[in-house]
């Protein structure tokens, strides 16, 4: 299992991940970083937009839930 596949499974299970891991995951599924204002980084794939806070060791639960929704929409 690749690191990216493991990240996908971890997020779908509700495990907390770091902002760097979220960046890796979003890039892997086709999102690109559009802009950054302070600690907030915006990612888009053309139809969806998600903002991730790039501070702290782990993402807050609200961002994990948003990632879960995106992954399910993408068919994971």
Image (cartoon, rainbow, N blue to C red):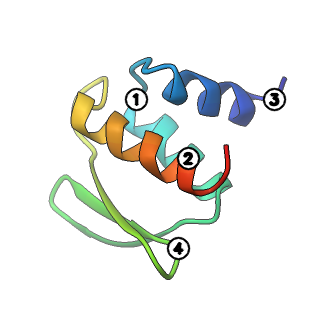
Which one is in front, 69 or 26? 69
Q: Position of residue 66 (x, y in %)?
A: 35, 46
Q: Position of residue 25 (x, y in %)?
A: 58, 45
The mark that comes first in sequence, 1 or 4, is 1
Residue with the mark numbered 3: 2
Which one is in front, 30 or 40? 30
The mark that comes first in sequence, 3 or 2, is 3
CA neighbours of label 4 inside 10 A, class few (<14), some (14 to 19), many (20+) = some
Q: Position of residue 62 (x, y in %)?
A: 23, 37
Outermost residue, left side: 38
The reply to whether discs 3 and 2 touch (Cβ–Cβ < 8 Å) is no
Residue with the mark numbered 1: 18
Q: Tell me the CA gap for discs 2 and 1.
A: 20 Å
Is label 2 in a helix, a strand or a loop?
Answer: helix
Residue with the mark numbered 4: 45
CA neighbours of label 3 inside 10 A, class few (<14), some (14 to 19), many (20+) = few
Q: Tell me the CA gap for discs 3 and 1.
A: 17 Å
Image quadrant in which you'd find residue 42:
bottom left
Q: Quadrant of the C terminus?
A: top right
Is label 4 in a helix, a strand or a loop?
Answer: loop
The reply to whether discs 4 and 2 touch (Cβ–Cβ < 8 Å) is no
Q: Quadrant of the N terminus?
A: top right
Q: Is residue 66 left or right of residue 73?
A: left
Residue with the mark numbered 2: 72
The mark that comes first in sequence, 2 or 1, is 1
Outermost residue, bottom side: 46
The mark that comes first in sequence, 3 or 4, is 3
Q: Residue at x 52, y 73 (%)?
A: 45
Is label 3 in a helix, a strand or a loop?
Answer: loop
Disc nearest the viewer among 1 and 4: 4
Q: Tell me the CA gap for discs 4 and 2.
A: 15 Å
Q: Is residue 20 left or right of residue 41?
A: right
């Amino acid at each position: 299992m690749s690191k990216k596949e493991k990240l996908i499974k971890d997020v779908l299970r509700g495990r907390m991940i770091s902002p760097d891991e979220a960046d890796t995951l979003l890039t892997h599924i086709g999102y690109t970083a559009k802009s950054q204002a302070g600690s907030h980084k915006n990612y888009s794939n053309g139809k969806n937009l998600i903002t991730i806070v790039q501070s702290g060791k782990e993402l807050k639960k609200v961002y994990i839930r948003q990632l879960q929704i995106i992954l399910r929409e993408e068919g994971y």
